Image: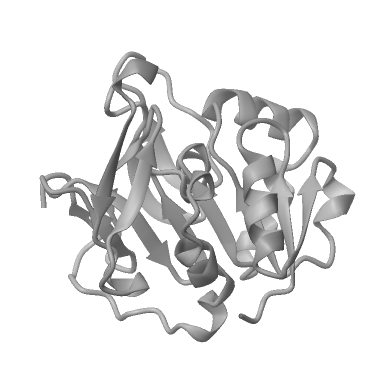
Amino acid sequence: MLMKRIGVLALQGSFVEHIAMLQNLGVEASPIRLRKQLQDLDGLVIPGGESTTIAKLMQIYDLTEAIQELTSNGLPVLGTCAGMVLLSRSATHPESSSGLDTIGAINIEVRRNAFGRQINSFETDISIPALGEEPFRAIFIRAPIITRAGTEVEILARLEDGTSVAARQGKVLVCAFHPELTDDTRFHKYFLELERRPSPPPTLSGEGREVVGG
């Protein structure tokens, strides 16, 4: 693991669990609430929670543009659930026609709350080849899905029906589930090692491809 000092956006959501998991891995992890706290980080985590609320608080605390600048300059970043939504190029909601201001750090389009409300949350074992052969127990809570991905984006995990739920573009790593709510540290370890894991070459020509259902 190369990254030693990780900031976890701590405006709302499951930031405490992310900090605890990173600290258990021997990393200096600290909550980020102010723009000045973004200095001298080796990486950043944007946790799950309520994406609309987090987006509004990021604007209030003058964090949105600062994070956009950091990610465009190559800072490794992990986004889980709402974090994936916020890092995406664009996000839609099945019950709303209004969009959400996103950071645009990874060239994916996502659908928020794709599985329904809280009562429709679920757990399932998924295959993430980048983490090894052992299945990963994924917890989905009002989760988004990836509906479209650019050619530079590597899809890391899919559900059995082909729905894309994790992806990577360079130093940006996202997933629709909550690895911080499990005892499995492999996803966080993968994030901490991003800088020494080469990105795959583009797989298709053109601007992107639909990824739902395969």
Residue that appears at 17% across and 45% down: 212
Give the residue furthest to the top.
95
Q: Is residue 1 left or right of residue 100?
A: right
Is residue 164 in view? yes
Q: Is residue 96 left or right of residue 76?
A: left
- Residue 96, position as x, y percentages in the image: 36, 15
- The quarter of the picture where residue 161 lies is top left
- The quarter of the picture where residue 115 lies is top left
Instruction: Tell me if residue 188 comes above or below residue 195 in the rendering.
Output: above
Instruction: Tell me if residue 55 comes above or below residue 182 in the rendering.
Output: above
Q: How is the image coloured?
A: one colour
Q: Nearer the viewer, residue 204 or 94?
A: 94
Instruction: Tell me if residue 112 comes above or below residue 182 in the rendering.
Output: above
Residue that appears at 50% across and 54% down: 183
- Residue 168, position as x, y percentages in the image: 40, 64
- Residue 178, position as x, y percentages in the image: 46, 44
Q: Nearer the viewer, residue 214 or 67?
A: 214
Instruction: Tell me if residue 96 comes above or below residue 131 in the rendering.
Output: above
- The quarter of the picture where residue 141 lies is top left
Is residue 147 in view? no
Q: Is residue 214 left or right of residue 16?
A: left
Residue that appears at 66% across and 60% down: 22
Quadrant that contains the N terminus:
bottom right
- Residue 134, position as x, y percentages in the image: 28, 68
Give the residue furthest to the front.
183
Q: How many marks?
A: 0
Q: Nearer the viewer, residue 65 or 140?
A: 140
Q: Is residue 155 left or right of residue 193?
A: left
